[in-house]
Image (cartoon, rainbow, N blue to C red):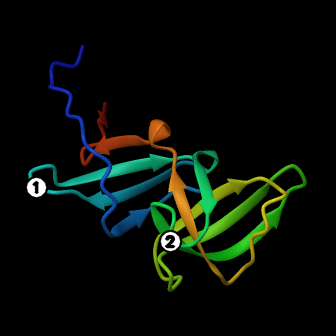
Protein backbone atom coordinates (compact mmCIF):
# COMPACT_ATOMS: atom_id res chain seq x y z
CA UNK A 1 0.00 0.00 0.00
CA UNK A 2 1.24 3.47 -0.88
CA UNK A 3 1.69 5.57 2.26
CA UNK A 4 2.26 8.81 0.37
CA UNK A 5 -0.54 11.34 0.77
CA UNK A 6 -2.80 11.77 -2.23
CA UNK A 7 -2.68 15.25 -3.71
CA UNK A 8 -5.64 16.62 -5.56
CA UNK A 9 -4.88 19.14 -8.25
CA UNK A 10 -7.28 21.50 -9.91
CA UNK A 11 -7.22 21.41 -13.72
CA UNK A 12 -4.88 24.15 -14.86
CA UNK A 13 -3.96 24.40 -18.53
CA UNK A 14 -0.84 26.54 -18.88
CA UNK A 15 1.63 26.28 -21.75
CA UNK A 16 2.38 22.76 -22.95
CA UNK A 17 5.96 21.58 -22.85
CA UNK A 18 6.02 17.96 -24.06
CA UNK A 19 3.90 15.09 -25.42
CA UNK A 20 4.62 11.50 -26.47
CA UNK A 21 2.86 8.26 -27.61
CA UNK A 22 0.22 8.12 -30.36
CA UNK A 23 -2.39 6.33 -28.22
CA UNK A 24 -1.94 7.60 -24.69
CA UNK A 25 -1.26 11.31 -24.85
CA UNK A 26 0.88 12.25 -21.88
CA UNK A 27 1.39 15.99 -21.90
CA UNK A 28 3.61 17.79 -19.39
CA UNK A 29 2.22 20.93 -17.85
CA UNK A 30 4.04 23.35 -15.63
CA UNK A 31 1.85 23.72 -12.55
CA UNK A 32 2.10 26.28 -9.79
CA UNK A 33 4.83 25.62 -7.20
CA UNK A 34 5.30 23.52 -5.14
CA UNK A 35 3.76 20.92 -7.47
CA UNK A 36 6.39 21.28 -10.18
CA UNK A 37 5.71 19.34 -13.39
CA UNK A 38 2.81 16.95 -13.75
CA UNK A 39 1.98 14.76 -16.74
CA UNK A 40 -1.55 14.74 -18.07
CA UNK A 41 -2.65 11.53 -19.81
CA UNK A 42 -5.47 12.04 -22.31
CA UNK A 43 -6.98 9.42 -24.62
CA UNK A 44 -8.12 10.58 -28.10
CA UNK A 45 -11.72 9.49 -27.37
CA UNK A 46 -11.80 11.73 -24.27
CA UNK A 47 -11.35 14.95 -26.24
CA UNK A 48 -14.02 16.88 -28.13
CA UNK A 49 -13.54 19.32 -31.00
CA UNK A 50 -15.53 22.52 -30.52
CA UNK A 51 -15.55 26.00 -32.02
CA UNK A 52 -12.35 28.02 -31.78
CA UNK A 53 -12.16 29.87 -28.47
CA UNK A 54 -14.84 27.80 -26.72
CA UNK A 55 -12.74 24.84 -25.56
CA UNK A 56 -9.98 24.38 -23.00
CA UNK A 57 -7.31 25.08 -25.65
CA UNK A 58 -7.21 26.01 -29.31
CA UNK A 59 -5.41 23.77 -31.78
CA UNK A 60 -4.30 23.78 -35.42
CA UNK A 61 -5.74 20.96 -37.56
CA UNK A 62 -2.91 19.20 -39.42
CA UNK A 63 -4.68 16.14 -40.87
CA UNK A 64 -8.20 14.68 -40.82
CA UNK A 65 -8.27 10.93 -41.47
CA UNK A 66 -11.71 9.49 -42.22
CA UNK A 67 -12.21 5.97 -40.87
CA UNK A 68 -15.86 5.50 -41.82
CA UNK A 69 -17.42 5.30 -38.35
CA UNK A 70 -15.09 8.00 -36.98
CA UNK A 71 -12.46 10.57 -37.90
CA UNK A 72 -8.94 10.65 -36.48
CA UNK A 73 -7.89 14.29 -36.26
CA UNK A 74 -4.21 15.22 -35.87
CA UNK A 75 -3.82 18.56 -34.10
CA UNK A 76 -1.09 20.84 -32.77
CA UNK A 77 -1.86 22.83 -29.64
CA UNK A 78 -2.02 26.57 -30.30
CA UNK A 79 -3.28 28.63 -33.21
CA UNK A 80 0.08 28.66 -35.03
CA UNK A 81 0.45 24.88 -35.45
CA UNK A 82 3.81 24.80 -33.68
CA UNK A 83 2.69 23.29 -30.36
CA UNK A 84 2.44 19.79 -28.95
CA UNK A 85 0.83 17.15 -31.15
CA UNK A 86 -2.54 15.83 -30.04
CA UNK A 87 -4.98 13.35 -31.59
CA UNK A 88 -8.75 13.40 -31.29
CA UNK A 89 -11.31 10.79 -32.36
CA UNK A 90 -14.32 12.69 -33.71
CA UNK A 91 -17.71 11.59 -35.10
CA UNK A 92 -17.87 11.27 -38.91
CA UNK A 93 -20.61 13.91 -39.28
CA UNK A 94 -18.47 16.66 -37.70
CA UNK A 95 -17.14 18.94 -40.46
CA UNK A 96 -13.45 19.52 -39.73
CA UNK A 97 -11.21 21.32 -42.21
CA UNK A 98 -7.45 20.91 -42.35
CA UNK A 99 -5.24 23.96 -41.83
CA UNK A 100 -7.82 25.64 -39.59
CA UNK A 101 -7.95 26.40 -35.86
CA UNK A 102 -10.48 24.58 -33.67
CA UNK A 103 -11.17 24.43 -29.95
CA UNK A 104 -10.50 21.27 -27.95
CA UNK A 105 -12.44 20.39 -24.81
CA UNK A 106 -11.04 17.90 -22.27
CA UNK A 107 -13.42 15.49 -20.51
CA UNK A 108 -12.28 16.37 -16.99
CA UNK A 109 -13.70 13.14 -15.54
CA UNK A 110 -11.42 11.12 -17.84
CA UNK A 111 -8.09 12.93 -17.31
CA UNK A 112 -5.18 11.08 -15.71
CA UNK A 113 -2.53 13.09 -13.84
CA UNK A 114 0.93 11.74 -12.98
CA UNK A 115 3.69 13.20 -10.81
CA UNK A 116 7.07 13.93 -12.35
CA UNK A 117 8.34 10.59 -10.96
CA UNK A 118 5.48 8.74 -12.69
CA UNK A 119 3.12 8.02 -9.78
CA UNK A 120 -0.55 8.69 -10.48
CA UNK A 121 -2.10 11.69 -8.75
CA UNK A 122 -5.60 10.76 -7.59
Q: Is residue 98 left or right of residue 85?
A: right
Q: Residue furthest right?
A: 68
- For the residues labelled 1 and 2, say whether their Cβ atoms are less than 8 Å apart: no
Q: Mark 1 vs mark 2: which is more N-terminal? A: 1
Can you say which quadrant of the picture contains the C terminus? top left
Can you say which quadrant of the picture contains the N terminus? top left
Q: Is residue 50 left or right of residue 35?
A: right
Q: Is residue 64 left or right of residue 38?
A: right
Residue wearing tag 2 = 53
Q: Is residue 93 left or right of residue 105?
A: right
Describe the element under mark 1 as helix, strand or loop.
loop
Residue at x 45%, y 43% (from the top left corner)? 108
Residue at x 61%, y 54% (from the top left corner)? 48
Residue 28 at x, y = what percent? 34, 58
Describe the element under mark 2 as helix, strand or loop.
loop
Residue at x 20%, y 34% (from the top left corner)? 7
Residue 94 in which image quadrant? bottom right
Looking at the image, which is closer to me, 40 or 78?
Answer: 78
Residue 6 in which image quadrant? top left
Looking at the image, which is closer to me, 70 or 18?
Answer: 70
Label 1 or label 2, whichever lies nearer to me, is 2
Real-space CA distance between mark 1 and mark 2, rounded to the nearest whole angstrom? 28 Å
> In the image, which disc is placed on residue 33?
1
Residue 32 at x, y = what percent? 16, 57
Q: Quick check: 105 above or below 65?
A: above
Q: Residues within 10 Å of mark 1 (few under 14, many from 20)?
A: few
Amino acid sequence: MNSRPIRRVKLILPALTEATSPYWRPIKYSLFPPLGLATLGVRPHDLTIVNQGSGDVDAWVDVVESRGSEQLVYLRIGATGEGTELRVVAPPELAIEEERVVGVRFDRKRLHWFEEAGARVE
